[in-house]
Amino acid sequence: MATAVAAPTTAPVRKLRIRRWLFAGVSILILVWLGPMLVAHSPILAWIIRLAARDVQGTVSVGSASLGWFSPPVLRDLRVCDSAGATVVAIDRLATDRTLLGLFCDHTDLGTIHIEQPVVHIALAGGTTNVQHLLRSSAAPPERKAATAAPKARVVVRNGQIRFRDADRNLTYGIEAFDLDLEATAPPKLKLAARGQLNDGAGALEFSAALDGAQLTVEKALVTSRACHLSARGIVDLARDRLDLDTLRFNSEWVSGEGHLTCTELSAARRVEFTGQLAYDLEKVEPLLRPYLGSQVTITGKGARPLRLHGPLTPTDGKPVLAALEAEAGGHWSAIRAFPGGAGQGHGCMVGPAEVRAKLHSGIVVVAPVQAACNGGTIHVAPKLRLEPGPIMLDVPAGPLLERVQLTPGLCASGLRYALPLLADVAEVDGKLSLRLDHARLPLADAKAADVKGTLVLHDAKVAPGPAIRAINEVLRVGSAYGIVRPSDVRFTMAHGKVRHDNLELVFPDFSLRTSGTVDLDGTLQLIGELTIHAKSHAKNPLLASLAKQSWKVPIRGTIDRPQVDVRALGSAAAGSALEGLVVPRLEQGLKKLVPPRP
């Protein structure tokens, strides 16, 4: 009886259990099937991304995702931000060509990852970048990271951008468009090819390289812009922190060159050594030198000379870069033409060809002694240019600078006019000039801070009257057309924006004038002239006879171009005589006629 009752009760229970298991199985399958979609539209995705990016010192977020077992996963609006919330990487779309199920079954092969329209923001400050700070982490021990095999992958980037911000130099620049193909295998071997445009379409970039372990072989690096063309081939050894470019060529509007470049300590001091050739065309370089040479100097010459450069590219031991770098270079000029005179007078100064050799050491450029022909004479120069510490200073050592150089109106109208103001703006001049320096220190950015001392000697010099002499000729009613410079050493100094000279004497048929005093760099005169009337002129002119008894001090003011002779000093010489009423009016009338007063 008991067996007959139990049989019909067991069968429904078994069927119920089977139904429950089938329902649970189907539910699980549905959940598994819908799982990726649920993850894509729930906070679970953000949790997974945070877990995957736990070594990033910042945040990683995704705007939206498309996930399915039998379709490739797609992430949109992917952003990587630093700890301050600033965007470092922004990706419009990231996808792989493998299905999610395929990745789940074999995560060692990521397939081809497509990254569309990424924008990378790189900020440089204090010798480091925001990318270095972003990846700096101690979350995982080095042993575990080293044991992790790199997955196989190919990364394809399209329409990417890289934007740089250099806070140390307050510069912004970047690559506005680049494509990249990268292949990774285990052990890591990467192939990279990139091309892009520089900012505002100003140039193009091409790059291709292969990484084998810790050695990156740069097969092609080419930068072309309006200002420069640069190409290189070489090897970056990451293990030795070293770069070797066996071929480096650069070409610009001003200079070009090629050679071998080695850079060690890439992550720190970046010590470089370059050996090669530098080609130049001084006529094209001249516009860059114009702020220092002035608008009245032209220089020509072209050629190629060896160039060697070595030292760190980052400040070390508290020294600026230029104070630690060392370099050796040479050059050649064909001609230097300066200070052109008036029509038909040619150039005021013509320097013949010369070879120049220079070395950079401890922030100072030392030029080997140069000797060249100059206006029929000789110029000797061996300057030193101090770059660091600033300001930039030009030092010229003591010794002869010019030897028996032919005087020209253009030369007299140059810087010589401050030391020899009576020769400024003369229409004709003949003779030789020698210049010896006691010392010369010239800050290139501040001429008023210059400190110069030396001696000028004029040999057999003959000059036509300048503005000051013409004024005296007019008031004395004499016609001295030419005069000679009495042989003597004219001492001069330049300090605090003023040039002082002593003992400059011009001798004319009717009178002699010796001057001393200062000339400001703006041309302002503060001179005292000692006027002596020659005795042989007494019979010619009663006015000269009244002044010929002794020498008279004559102040000369105004500017180099518009000198003002104080005629009242000459009037006092005739005081008490019948000519007093005649002298002063005549002098004043003659001076105003020659140099009209300014409006």
Image (tube, grey):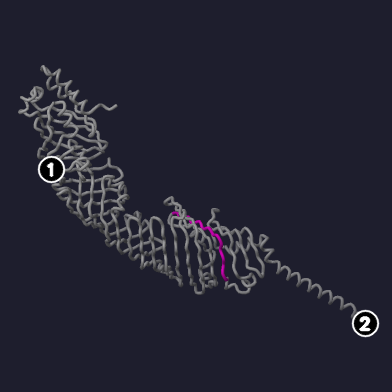
Q: Is residue 75 magenta?
A: no
Tags 1 and 2 in contact by the CB under 8 Å rule? no
- Disc 2, SS: helix
Q: Position of residue 101 (x, y in %)?
A: 65, 71
In magenta, the rendered stretch is 111-125
| Picture layout, residue 478 above or below residue 59 | above
The quarter of the rendered structure image containing the C terminus is: top left
Whether residue 234 sits left or right of residue 32 in the image: it is left
Q: Quadrant of the N terminus?
A: bottom right
Q: Residues within 10 Å of mark 2 (few under 14, many from 20)?
A: few
Which residue is found at the position 21% from the left and 35% from the top?
Answer: 518
Q: Earlier in the sequence, mark 1 or mark 2?
A: 2
Say left or right for 168 vs 438.
Answer: right
Q: Residue 476: image x %, image y %?
A: 13, 26
Q: CA distance from mark 1 to mark 2?
A: 148 Å
Q: Which residue is mark 2?
A: 4
Q: Is residue 495 above or below residue 351?
A: above
Magenta span main SS: strand
Camera-near label (1 vs 2) is 1
Nearest the camera: 407 or 65?
Answer: 407
Query: How many residues crowd around disc 1 within 10 Å: few (fewer than 14), some, or many (20 or more)?
Result: some
Number of numbered callouts drawn: 2
Q: Amino acid at mark 1?
A: Gly
Numbered mark located on residue 160 in the image: none
Mark 1 falls on what kind of element? Answer: strand
Q: Which residue is mark 1?
A: 431
Describe residue 5's horizontal placement relative to residue 265 as left or right: right
In the rendered structure, the answer to whether residue 375 lies left or right of residue 13 reads left
In this view, the residue in front, 314 or 425, is 425
Disc 2 residue type (three-letter): Ala
